[in-house]
Amino acid sequence: MKFCTCLSPEPVRFSAYPFKGDFAQNVESIRNIGFDGIELIVRDPGTLNQDAIIKLVHDAGMDIPAIGTGLAWGEEGLSFTDPDPEIREKAVQRIFAHVPLAAKAGAVIVVGLLRGIVRPEVDPKTADEWMFEGFSRCCRHASDEGVRIAFEPINRYETSLLNGVDEGLEFIAEVGGDNLGMLLDTFHMNIEEPSIEKSIQKAGDRIFHFHYADSNRWYPGAGHLDFHSILTSLKDTGYSAYLSGEHRPDPEPAEAARMGLENMKKILGELQ
Ligand code: LER
Ligand code: MN
């Protein structure tokens, strides 16, 4: 398994990204801390100099294993389940726009917050149908370009649409397609799963990407999650891709990222 952490080339408000601010400087710090890659957090790929960003990360000797898309929800309010059909369409088109970037970077596209929430005026069944339609269209489109999509179960306080691994697995099976899998995030799992380890086991080879944060969403080691048993379960599934640090920047960004990486590498080393 390799390690990356989340970084955006533009300003973000989301509290669980360790690094904010100057992109090039952060790429250098992340490399110096010892990460192997950057999970690129992108609001709208059309506004970026994609080749320059990919080159900057590659020149630093790192990969871009994943692209996070939640900023389009957080900063612009786009979602697959908005009552306004134009906004739903914009959300789908936004994922379509990520596909060429993901193909160039060799990244999986993460779809988490962009599924949206059930608005008070919308029947939950209708929201489910819109979400299904959004994912189905995006997966078909991405599949044509050989790009994979990772659906992220998110805890109940952020959305009522698909919080746990069991319902997530049912959903991805319904949508179908080999290019749709899951992103498991230990912070959400700690809230939703009866057993984090058993849910990892169930998700098995459908795990396309993995976010780590401790119970308090600080770096691993700052809370009370048992990363030894979590990583044992993950390793047992045969997962060999990236572990991505998505946690708060406290007490200080570089220190939080370094402590998280150090603790995770130590545990992983003990398993080998
Ligand atoms: C949201 O809480 C989350 O975990 C992120 O991965 C954003 O999509
Ligand atoms: Mn996450």
Image (tube, helix red, strand yellow):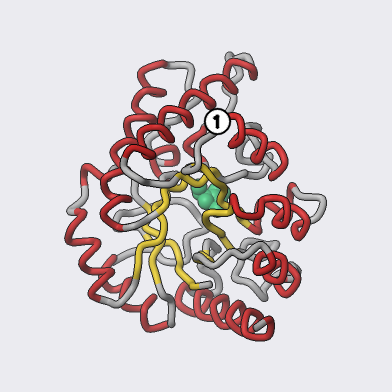
Q: Residues within 10 Å of mark 1 (few under 14, many from 20)?
A: some
Q: Which quadrant holds the C terminus?
A: bottom right
Q: Residue at x 59, y 23 (%)?
A: 128
Residue 98 percent coordinates (x, y): 32, 43
Q: Is residue 251 above or below residue 186?
A: below
Q: Residue at x 67, y 35 (%)?
A: 170
Quick check: 192 left or right of 79? Answer: right
Residue 240 percent coordinates (x, y): 54, 67
Q: Residue at x 55, y 70 (%)?
A: 250
Single out the residue that lies furthest toward the right. 194
Quick check: 97 left or right of 152? Answer: left
Find residue 151 and report its image quarter.
top right
Q: Which residue is mark 1?
A: 175
Q: Is residue 201 above or below residue 252?
A: above
Find residue 171 and report its image quarter.
top right
Quick check: 57 left or right of 91? Answer: left
Q: Residue at x 69, y 36 (%)?
A: 167
Pick the residue in front: 219 or 178: 178
Residue 258 percent coordinates (x, y): 50, 80
